[in-house]
Image (cartoon, grey):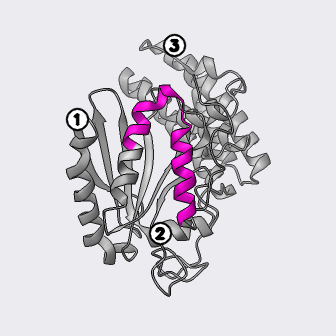
C-alpha cells in the first residue's frame, strides 16, 4: 500500500541543518511496511554525522513523493564537500569508498554495482546495493556544489533532507563554495526538471526512428529485434504522455504516468503490445504510430514544439504498406 499523501514534512530545499532534523521526524513517521528502507536511510544519516566529507543526504523519487511501498528502492544522493566536476573526483571517490565499506553493516548484501554516471560536466559516482531482504539502495555520490546549483535552479522538488552539515564558520552556507545562482562550472543553471519543446521533438523523433527500425527488422524476419524496437517506441510514448500531463519527471516514462494519474493512459496503448509473431508485430507497429502521434501532439500542446511531421508521415506510410 502506498504511503499516505502528505506524510512527513514538505520537501525541503536542504538549506539548513534544521531540515535534517525534520527529515528524522519524517523517517520516524514512515509506516511499518517501509521499515527496511527506514533502517538503511537512518543508518546513512547517522554515518553522515561521522564522515567529514559528507555535506548532505537527500532521499527522493517515490519515497520523497509519499508514493512508496514495501517494494520501492531508496533513491538518494550524498552531497560531498568537494569541488564540482573532475576537480572533485578524488574526494567523491573517497566518500564513495566509505559508503561501500559500510554497506555490510546495513544488512546482508547480495551484490553491489559502483560506476560513474551523469553528464560529463559533473563527476557523479553511483552505488547500487541489493540486499538479501529485497531492499535496494540507489545512491548518487556527488559534489555538494552540484546539488546546491540544482536546488537553486528549482530541481529536486520531491527530495527530503535527512542530513545537512552545519555551516562552516564565516560561510553562512552549509559546505557550499558556489556563488548563488551559478553552477560549479560558472554557467547559469537551467531548470533541472523543465521540459522544453526541443525535448518533446527529440522524444517524438526517436519514437519514429524506433518504428521505422521495427519495420526494417520485420522485413528481415528478425522478430526479436522488431519487438525490441517496438518497446523503445513505447518508451518514448510514455515520456511524451507524462510530459503532456505535467508529471514531475517525464523522462522516466511509464512510472511517471502511473504515479501521476494511473487511470489516464494514451488511448490505444494496449494495441501496441505484441508477441513474437510477424503479423502481430506489424499490427502493433501500426497501432504504435497512431498512439505516438496522439502523445506527441498532446505533449506539444503543453510544451510548444516543432514536431517531426515529415518523419511521422513517412514512417506511417511505410508501416501501412503490405509486407
Residue 188 position (above or below residue 157): below
CA distance separating discs 1 and 3: 42 Å
Q: Are marks 1 and 2 in contact (CB under 8 Å)?
A: no
The mark total stands at: 3
What is the span of residues highlighted in magenta in the rendered image?
17-40
Viewer-nearest of discs 2 and 3: 2
Which residue lies most toward the right here? 301
Q: Earlier in the sequence, mark 2 or mark 3?
A: 2
Instruction: Report the disc number at residue 195.
Output: none
Mark 1 residue crowding within 10 angstroms, few (<14) / some (14–19) / many (20+): some
The residue singled out by tag 1 in the image is 109
- In the image, 304 versus 277, the foreground residue is 304
Residue located beneath label 3 in the image = 280
Q: Quadrant of the N terminus?
A: top right
Q: Picture coordinates of residue 230 (x, y %)?
A: 49, 28
Q: Which residue lies most toward the bottom here?
A: 170
Please identify the dominant SS of the magenta region. helix
Amino acid at each position: 500500500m502506498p504511503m499516505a499523501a502528505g506524510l512527513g514534512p514538505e520537501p525541503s530545499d536542504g538549506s539548513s541543518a534544521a531540515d535534517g532534523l525534520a527529515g528524522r521526524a519524517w523517517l520516524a513517521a514512515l509506516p511499518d511496511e517501509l521499515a527496511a528502507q527506514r533502517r538503511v536511510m537512518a543508518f546513512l544519516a547517522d554515518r553522515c554525522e561521522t564522515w567529514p566529507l559528507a555535506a548532505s543526504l537527500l532521499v527522493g523519487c517515490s519515497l520523497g513523493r509519499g508514493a512508496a511501498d514495501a517494494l520501492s528502492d531508496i533513491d538518494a544522493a550524498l552531497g560531498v564537500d568537494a569541488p564540482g566536476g573532475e576537480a572533485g573526483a578524488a574526494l567523491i571517490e573517497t566518500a564513495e569508498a566509505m559508503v561501500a565499506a559500510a554497506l555490510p553493516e546495513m544488512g546482508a548484501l547480495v551484490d553491489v554495482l559502483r560506476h560513474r554516471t551523469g553528464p560529463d560536466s559533473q563527476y557523479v559516482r553511483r552505488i547500487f546495493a541489493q540486499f538479501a531482504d529485497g531492499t535496494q539502495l540507489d545512491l548518487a555520490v556527488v559534489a555538494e556544489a552540484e546539488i546546491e546549483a540544482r536546488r537553486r535552479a528549482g530541481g529536486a522538488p520531491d527530495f527530503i533532507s535527512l542530513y545537512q552539515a552545519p555551516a562552516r564558520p564565516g560561510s553562512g552556507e552549509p559546505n557550499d563554495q558556489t556563488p548563488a545562482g551559478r553552477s560549479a562550472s560558472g554557467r547559469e543553471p537551467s531548470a533541472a526538471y523543465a521540459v522544453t519543446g526541443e525535448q518533446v521533438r527529440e522524444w517524438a523523433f526517436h519514437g519514429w526512428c524506433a518504428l521505422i527500425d521495427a519495420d526494417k527488422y520485420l522485413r528481415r524476419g528478425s522478430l526479436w529485434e522488431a519487438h525490441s524496437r517496438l518497446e523503445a517506441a513505447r518508451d518514448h510514448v510514455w515520456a511524451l504522455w507524462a510530459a503532456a500531463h505535467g508529471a514531475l519527471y517525464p523522462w522516466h516514462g511509464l512510472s511517471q504516468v502511473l504515479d501521476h494519474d494511473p487511470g489516464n493512459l494514451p488511448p490505444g496503448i494496449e494495441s501496441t503490445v505484441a508477441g513474437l509473431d510477424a503479423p502481430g508485430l506489424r499490427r502493433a507497429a501500426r497501432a504504435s504510430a497512431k498512439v505516438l502521434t496522439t502523445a506527441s501532439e498532446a505533449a506539444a500542446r503543453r510544451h510548444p514544439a516543432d514536431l517531426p511531421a515529415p518523419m511521422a508521415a513517412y514512417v506511417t506510410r511505410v508501416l501501412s504498406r503490405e509486407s
